[in-house]
Image (tube, rainbow, N blue to C red):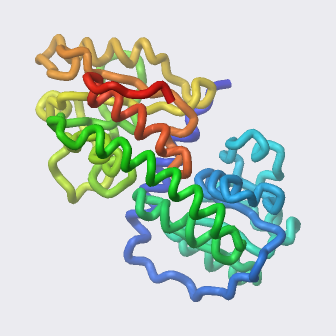
Amino acid sequence: MRRFWPLLLLFAILLVAIVAQQARMPEKQTVLSSPERIISLAPSLTEIAFALGLGNKLVGVTRYCNYPPAAKTLPRIGSFLDPNFDAIVQLQPDLVLLLENNPRIIKQLHQLDIATLAVNNETLLDIDNAINKISQPTHTTQQANMLRTTIHDVITGIQQQVADQEKPRVLIVISRDGDSGPITNRYIAGHHDFYDDLIQLAGGINAFPDNKIAIPSLSAEGLLQLNPDIIIELFPAADEHPFNLQKISQQWQQLHQISPLTAVQNNQVHIIEADYTTIPGPRLPLLLKEMARLIHPNLKWDAS
């Protein structure tokens, strides 16, 4: 059965982050040096832990943690939004990795005398800081430095390639209402998340002008008025969403019949379907590379 969880999870986490921005963080607990039993409460943090060589110390992950494949074999403890605290206690962790935009969960874990390490992953800088922060108590700073250098090298290389190019207006669609009938609603990337960072690094400009709305929602009329140069729709892996991508493409063609859309007219409506499109973790350079190729197809890109 096809599922829609990755986009819904990302959307929910972004909403929680907005609500929690002004919330007071619970009192911090001392993190045990060299923790041996770690639980991850977010797919992005699971990927970071594995990338740092901590896979053998992970004893529990969320139901959404499916990468790398080894993560699928670990015990499931619910999700970021509704963790199973009984299951967490039974696993006897000495550290729980989670996102700092849910202080309620952090407080409950502290009440259970479970140490937490909370990080942010809303922007690329946050992700870089999260890698560094997780590496410190786990004594994986060398692995973290190598991982961060690899990510930075990809970013720098793409920035250099697109530096002298014109910057088209790019619309990133992160969630949608359906694939049948005309377009009625699209949720797009605003100016306060890693997607906006990727647009800029890939040599584009976020087509949505208002930087006050974190997760803009646009009707068909709003999309026509915005009229971006490039449209990129993001989907997780094929078995993790319920949409027919051919119908999604047809929806844009139908909208173009109502009023001309520059992106449709110039064949600049693209779909990226991959399991890393919704995970703000170490694999974001893969998404950055794909976006850069789509935004600047005139450049010579290597095959990697």
Residue 226 rendering spot, x and y as whole percentages: 14, 35
Report which quarter residue 89 is drawn in.
bottom right
Report which quarter residue 2 is drawn in.
top right
Above or below, comparing residue 211 to residue 231 in the picture: below
- Say if residue 277 shows up in the picture: yes
Above or below, comparing residue 255 to residue 152 in the picture: above
- Horizontally, residue 274 falls left or right of residue 255, namely right
Residue depicted at x 56% and y 69%: 132
Residue depicted at x 40% and y 58%: 123
Residue 15 rendering spot, x and y as whole percentages: 42, 57
Give whichever of 131, 41 is nearer the camera: 131
Give whichever of 117, 221 is nearer the camera: 117
Residue 61 rendering spot, x and y as whole percentages: 73, 55
Residue depicted at x 54% and y 44%: 283
Above or below, comparing residue 80 to residue 109 in the picture: above
- Quadrant location, the N terminus: top right
- Say if residue 184 shows up in the picture: no
